Amino acid sequence: MTEIRAEIRLPTQELRNDLPFYTKVLKMRMDMIYPADNPEVAVLSGHGLRLRIEKGAKEAPGTLRILTENPDTFADGARALIAPNGTRIEIDDLNPPLILPKTEHAFVVRRLADQAPWVIGRAGMEYRDLVPSRLGGAMIASHIRVPDGPVPDMVHYHKVGFQLIFCVAGWVDVLYEDQGEKMRIHAGDCFIQPPTIRHKVLYSEGVQVVEIGVPAEHVTEIDHEMTLPNGVLNPDREWDGQRFVHNIGTNGAFAPFRIPGFEARDTTINANTKGVASVMVARPVGVAPWTRHQGDILFSFVMSGEMTLEGEGKDPHRLSPGDAFVIPPGLATRYSETTKDLQLLEVSLPGNPATEVI
């Protein structure tokens, strides 16, 4: 196989001033230097990078970021340095802790009829933002459409605190780390993707999903080393205290809901995330009273049927399939004028919020 190398070129005025800094402070290895009598070019490598430092090069010095598991033991704990050639060096944590922003509570109603734009995102998927404010960065809710056929996806994972994939139409095949062969979800089914579980979307037909992620901004990384399926079946494995969940809607049973006049199907997510979140499918069986919840985030998506959402001091909203809403804690609301075929997807963080009937 033909060898190919890539280099980043950086300028310098005096190479002899740069070499001690890059080799001793940044712990890079010198691979090449010339001419021997008066060096003007040196090639160094390290930390997954190959640098060509060249006297008189026309490029700007630029910025070099070094990520390490323990920044305090690298470069004497410095977080920012300027190399002799003018290159800025930034040293940061390779795996920074996940920061969950404080929720900025708001009453949010997002209607499909308002024609919010669908945006092309990762792997050719179309995204519709269901909570534009992101509640101050606390969460993201997306209505996603995936083009029919093979999905141009790669094995990847997300650095999140919580992530739900709930299928509302069609079906999709996905592979997951340590979960055996491919899995298919249909409308009414869902996956919980624990933090950093490797997965890959394979094929879809007519699929639409609602995806909830906490926090709103989180990193997606590609895993070039893992091949899925990986030949392991370990349904009891935990990632950051959470188990993978593949909940099949047709297998669920309905029981009384937190709101009187409704019943709900529990997707078992509250148990498998140890209370991080609960995901319920609710439907009316009577007349609902005014209630208020004492949770943090309470998101709902209308999957079928219609209802009127009333809120204390708010205009009523007639909702239909594809509409979504967020109710802040302490706000009195009522679900009224429901149709018999109404089904609501409700996601609450933390799980099973206390609810008061007014």
Image (cartoon, rainbow, N blue to C red):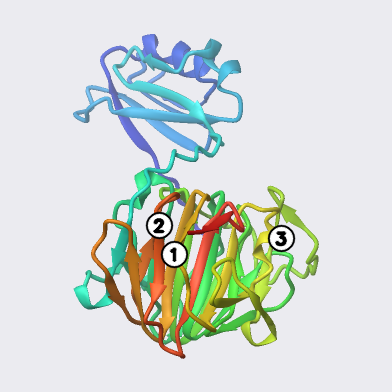
Q: Disc 3 or 2, which lies upstream in sequence? A: 3
CA–CA distance in space, label 2 to label 1: 6 Å
Closer to the N terminus: mark 1 or mark 3? Answer: 3
**Kind of residue at disc 2:** Ala
Q: Do callouts 2 and 1 mark residues in contact (Cβ within 8 Å)?
A: yes
Say which of marks 3 and 2 sits in front.
2
| Left/right of residue 344 with respect to residue 244 in the rendered view | left
Q: Are marks 1 and 3 in contact (CB under 8 Å)?
A: no
Say what secondary structure mark 1 lies in: loop
Instruction: Out of 316 and 149, give the one closest to the viewer.
Output: 316
| C-alpha span from label 1 to label 3 | 30 Å
Residue type of the residue flagged with mark 1 = Trp
Residue 331 lies, in percent from the top left, at: 39, 53
Which residue is rendered at x = 32% and y = 21% of the image?
Answer: 87
Query: Label 2 crowding class (10 Å Cα cut-off): few <14, some 14-19, many 20+?
Result: many
User: Of residues 284 and 57, which is closer to you in this image?
Assistant: 284
Q: Residues within 10 Å of mark 3 (few under 14, many from 20)?
A: many
Sequence-earlier tag: 2 or 1? 1
Please tell me which residue is depicted at 55% across the width and 10% down the height of the picture: 76
Which label is found at residue 272? 3
In the picture of the structure, the residue carrying the numbered disc 2 is: 332
Quarter occupied by residue 112: bottom left
User: Nearer the viewer's eye, disc 1 or disc 3?
Assistant: 1
Q: Position of residue 288 (x, y in %)?
A: 48, 74
